[in-house]
Amino acid sequence: MILLRKVITIITTTLFLTQSIAYCGLSYHVVEIPDVLSSEYSAVTGISDNRWACGYIQYRDCGKVTRVPFVWHRERGYQEIEGLSRVAVPVAINNNGQVAGIYYDAGKRGFFWDPNFGLTDIGDLGGNEVTVYDINNMGHIVGSSKTGKPALKGNTVEEHAFIWKESKIIDLGTLQRKGESQGDKSCAFGINDEGWIIGWSNVYRPGRGDGKVSGRLVTLWNPNGIPQEIKLDDGDFQTKKTKITNDGWILAKFNKLWVYNHKTKEKRISGYGCDGIANADLVYSNSGYPTHLLIYGKNGYQPIEIPFKPVDGFWTILKNINAINQNGDFGGNAGTIYGEDHAIILLKD
């Protein structure tokens, strides 16, 4: 059963209405997932363009935390993903209802789940530790994996970006600049349906002594797996806060927010914090309560608060947006009058 709560409408200021009239009256309706309300905590972690959602419920058994992944669809309802370890978290879902996520079993592992064919462990690059970040509509997964080889500097091991496709995990390697050696660490955070991948890489800079390893450089891998650096900012690149849309827009967070199209080379800059991108005109931020959207207008990105006051009084505040699709629907979790946080979906009208 799906319960629809009060329709909420984003109300902008008079100034903003003159900037972007196309977003006047942007409204959402709240969708509960009643199956999750019996747990102590739950959250939506991914939402596809055709409104599949994934997330997890959390409860305690003899003092131990258990996280159970689930998928939800408006027509097919709620389904738990079975066969994983005690702690498993889905991170992304595509239009086919296929899920990518992580679970813990003698190390952190990555999984692929298909509603028709079930579970697959995606393997690793030799280091028995995998982190998964995204899946596209082809069922291709990206993330990072330890390789088991010593890193160039410090008492660590290499960790490389990967793509998993056709049941194989492929090492995407690292950047190499002219006059510099390849680095030892990279990570892929987003992939679009054309196969473009966005993430970061370091490089090794020869010099006196042992040389120096660079910081995190924004890296774009083409569909053939060839990396190139995207030079946007000299500040500290904040990992995990980068995605790529099907039309080429990249979200990259440094000290400022960058939204950049690698095809047209158009750049947009904002001083606001940001955590995810729906499209070039709509991003979101979890920087403080309440959560808000950022909508692009004549004066750049402007924050729009999401009023969250359903009439029955069950929900109290929207805590986090964890995922957004390219249409502007999003999922996350919200607080209740009982002091719990639970999974919730907001679908754009």
Image: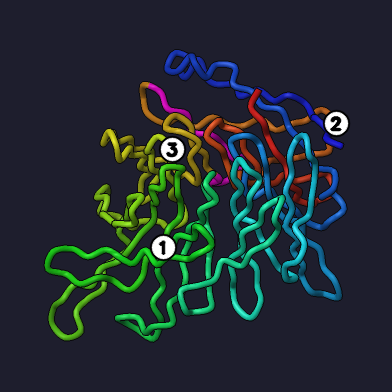
User: Is 299 drawn above or below residue 39 in the view shown?
Assistant: above
In the picture, the quarter occupied by the N terminus is top right
State the residue position of label 3. 246
**Left or right of 253 on screen, residue 328:** right
Q: Which is nearer the eye, 81 or 22? A: 81
**Left or right of 53 on screen, residue 134:** left
Q: Position of residue 301 (x, y in %)?
A: 42, 31
Which residue is at a point 68% across and 49% down the rendered structure image?
A: 54
1 vs 2, front mark: 1
| Start-end of magenta stretch | 286-297
Q: Amino acid at mark 2?
A: Asp
Question: What label does residue 92 carry, if any?
Answer: none
State the residue position of label 1. 187
In the picture, the quarter occupied by the C terminus is top right
Query: Residue 102 lies in what quarter of the image?
Result: bottom right
State the residue position of label 2. 312
